[in-house]
């Protein structure tokens, strides 16, 4: 074979290879476009997709995941498609202003807010959140948002130990949501699935799962492969690690109360009927009556109470309502139970529900998460209480 005949064959092979690559790229682009147009069931839809693009795996197995410093994501609000919501994480890993510094401004007071997606501000911009609306009602007080979507009290206590104490707060507000006793929230479910999908996309020893999971088509394909082949080892392993860390943290915190004269509040009464007893909301009362589920919350309260006493940082447990219109309010007994348990652990409690007036459903877009008006209504209740505790 001569050099003259070898060159055309090589050139032809390269042309065919480029043609194949172009066809595959066009097919992938078509599949991606079709997936987005059809919008089939996928594990990352709606507001959770925007929220989870700004998180990363935490080295702490109790925290599990954490906001990614410098991340930002925007998308239309689920309840108002004409308006966008932007989630931006600062260099400290908090959903707060970019210029927030560890050092407290001279002469200012600092209030830290711990909590879950309500405190984080799901579906509302930063300035619309409860945290910043409280700040706007106070003078020379800096309110800092340590809320993380999906966190429970145990994670909030750990986050305060690892990050919050360094911010030198004058007061800590722990926002308690009535779904807090429930383990492995929906957010954790999304996290486990994303991690499992990332394991499906490993090439040449390089982790490409994060970038590939940004594709709606590849995300859908990975989800189908996981379902068809039952590739759940990654999720099961992650859940086992998280559960083990959680149990260790609970046991460690509750050990501090053994041998003491600490008493527990009586559990909330079984609902007699109505909304709280229905299938939709009966789980709230059941979760607070379940000793195993409540042990995690009690451990968190115990840990926060101990930190408050040893570090001399006052803490206030703000009990958030469920935004339902039923009268009388069906979860008042649960609120009293939570407040009593907080006091037993050395935390002051402030119930936000009694101060709200009118139909509560008009303050929320899904009964658990307040909209902009709901955050404003909560801030109007909480700001005077914080001001009083700061001695203003």
Image (cartoon, rainbow, N blue to C red):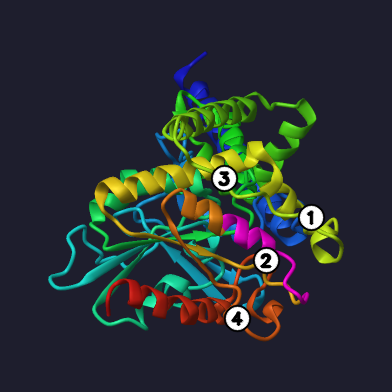
Residue 283, position in %: x, y?
75, 51
Of residue 125 and residue 384, the one placed in the foreground of this image is 384
**Placement of 45 over or under 258, stated as above or below:** below
Between circles 1 and 3, the one closer to the viewer is: 3
Sequence order check, earlier mark of 1 and 4 = 1
Range drawn in magenta: 326-338
| Front residue (pair 281, 311) | 311
Question: Tag 2's secondary structure?
Answer: helix
Residue annotated with mark 3:
264
Residue 152, above or below 390: above
Q: How many angstroms separate mark 4 from mark 2 (CA)?
A: 13 Å
Between the C-alphas of marks 1 and 2, the distance is 14 Å
Which quadrant of the view contains residue 138? Answer: bottom left
Name which residue lies at 41% across and 52% down: 346
Q: Pointer 2: what residue?
A: 332
Indicate which disc, 1 or 2, sits on the residue closer to the N terminus: 1
């Amino acid at each position: 074979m001569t050099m003259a005949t070898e060159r055309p064959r090589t050139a032809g092979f390269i042309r065919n290879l480029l043609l194949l690559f172009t066809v595959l790229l066009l097919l992938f682009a078509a599949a991606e476009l079709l997936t987005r147009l059809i919008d089939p069931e996928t594990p990352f839809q709606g507001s959770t997709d925007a929220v989870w693009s700004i998180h990363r795996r935490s080295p702490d197995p109790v925290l599990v995941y954490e906001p990614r410093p410098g991340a930002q994501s925007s998308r239309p609000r689920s309840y108002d498609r004409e308006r966008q919501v932007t989630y931006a994480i600062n260099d400290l890993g908090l959903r707060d202003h970019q210029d927030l510094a560890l050092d407290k401004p001279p002469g200012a007071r600092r209030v830290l807010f711990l909590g879950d997606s309500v405190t984080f501000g799901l579906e509302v911009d930063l300035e619309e959140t409860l945290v910043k609306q409280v700040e706007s009602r106070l003078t020379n007080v800096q309110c800092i948002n340590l809320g993380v979507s999906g966190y429970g009290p145990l994670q909030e206590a750990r986050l305060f130990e690892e990050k919050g104490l360094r911010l030198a707060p004058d007061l800590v507000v722990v926002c308690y949501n009535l779904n807090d006793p429930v383990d492995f929230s929906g957010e954790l479910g999304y996290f486990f699935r994303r991690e499992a999908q990332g394991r499906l996309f490993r090439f040449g020893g390089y982790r490409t799962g994060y970038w590939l999971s940004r594709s709606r088509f590849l995300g859908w394909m990975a989800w189908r492969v996981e379902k068809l082949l039952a590739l759940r080892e990654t999720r099961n392993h992650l859940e086992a690690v998280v559960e083990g860390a959680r149990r260790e943290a609970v046991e460690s915190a509750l050990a501090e109360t053994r041998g003491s004269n600490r008493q527990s509040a009586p559990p909330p009464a079984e609902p007699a009927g109505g909304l709280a007893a229905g299938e939709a909301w009966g789980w709230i009362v059941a979760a607070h009556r379940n000793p195993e589920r409540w042990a995690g919350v009690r451990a968190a309260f115990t840990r926060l109470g101990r930190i408050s006493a040893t570090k001399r940082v006052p803490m206030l447990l703000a009990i958030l309502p469920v935004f339902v219109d039923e009268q009388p309010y069906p979860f008042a007994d649960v609120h009293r139970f939570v407040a009593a348990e907080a006091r037993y652990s050395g935390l002051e409690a402030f119930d936000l529900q009694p101060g709200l007036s009118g139909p509560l459903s008009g303050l929320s877009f899904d009964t658990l998460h307040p909209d902009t008006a709901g955050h404003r209504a909560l801030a109007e209740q909480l700001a005077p209480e914080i001001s009083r505790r700061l001695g203003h």
